[in-house]
């Protein structure tokens, strides 16, 4: 079981990871985006960190919703609204809960991914963060159905997520800023799929 404190810890750890990988994420964004993915996300999670003390004692749903609202209001570009919407919807799914088991986690991820699809008007296969998100969820569901524990389940998710991020190099983007470069985007890994993979990796480290 993961409790509210652990969720706060995860958000702070994600912020640290994004800070560490900020330059790499921005570098990935240069050929296909606005060259600001890492910088923007790092700024958003820094704002979450500033507000983290006020989240103490809140339930998981409230923590996630608040973090989502902070990202929407502080992160420019597409990643703020996308990650923000994902966290806010996840928060609604977890409303009032102070503990989260594997089933809750999978449901929350499902809702978050749906939010990204709707907000980005995108589907898997269009060289976006969904190309890491969707395979990771499928892998985690399979692992859960096979009776694996949460550590193994998350490890499967991380593996599938990175494979999906890697696969975006072979896809022509039809959504978002990367769609403007068309086939010139081939060979370039999507920054959103990459930042999501880092985030899931942190979740696996903290929970697993």
Image (cartoon, grey):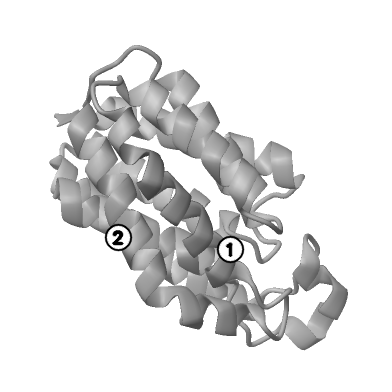
> Of the residues tagged 1 and 2, which is closer to the observer?
1
* Crowd around label 1: few <14 · some 14–19 · many ≥20 (10 Å): many
Cα gap from disc 1 to disc 2, whole angstroms: 20 Å
40 relative to 126 in the view: left or right:
left
In the image, residue 117 above or below residue 168? above
Q: Nearer the viewer, residue 179 or 27?
A: 27
Q: Which residue is mark 1?
A: 40
Please tell me which residue lies in front, 91 or 159.
91
User: Could you say which disc has been placed on residue 201 in the image?
Assistant: 2
Extreme residue in the top direction: 96
Quadrant in which the N terminus appears:
top left
| Quarter location, residue 106 | top left
Nearest to N terminus: mark 1 or mark 2: 1
Q: Position of residue 56 (x, y in %)?
A: 25, 28
What is the x, y in percent for residue 7?
27, 37
Q: Is residue 112 visible?
A: no
């Amino acid at each position: 079981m993961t409790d509210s404190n652990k969720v706060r810890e995860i958000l702070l750890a994600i912020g640290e990871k994004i800070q560490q990988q900020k330059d790499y994420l921005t570098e990935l964004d240069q050929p296909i985006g606005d060259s600001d993915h890492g910088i923007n996300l790092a700024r958003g999670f820094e704002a979450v960190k500033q507000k983290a003390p006020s989240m103490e004692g809140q339930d998981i749903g409230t923590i996630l919703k608040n973090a989502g609202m902070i990202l929407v209001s502080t992160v420019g570009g597409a990643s703020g609204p996308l990650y923000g919407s994902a966290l806010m919807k996840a928060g609604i799914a977890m409303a009032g809960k102070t503990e989260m088991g594997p089933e809750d986690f999978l449901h929350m991820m499902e809702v978050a991914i749906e939010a990204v699809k709707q907000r980005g008007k995108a589907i898997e296969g269009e060289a976006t963060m969904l190309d890491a998100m969707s395979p990771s969820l499928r892998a985690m569901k399979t692992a859960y159905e096979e009776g694996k524990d949460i550590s193994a389940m998350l490890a499967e998710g991380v593996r599938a997520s990175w494979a999906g991020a890697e696969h975006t190099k072979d896809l022509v983007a039809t959504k978002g800023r990367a769609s403007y470069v068309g086939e010139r985007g081939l060979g370039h890994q999507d920054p959103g799929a990459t930042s999501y993979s880092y985030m899931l990796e942190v979740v696996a480290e903290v929970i697993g």
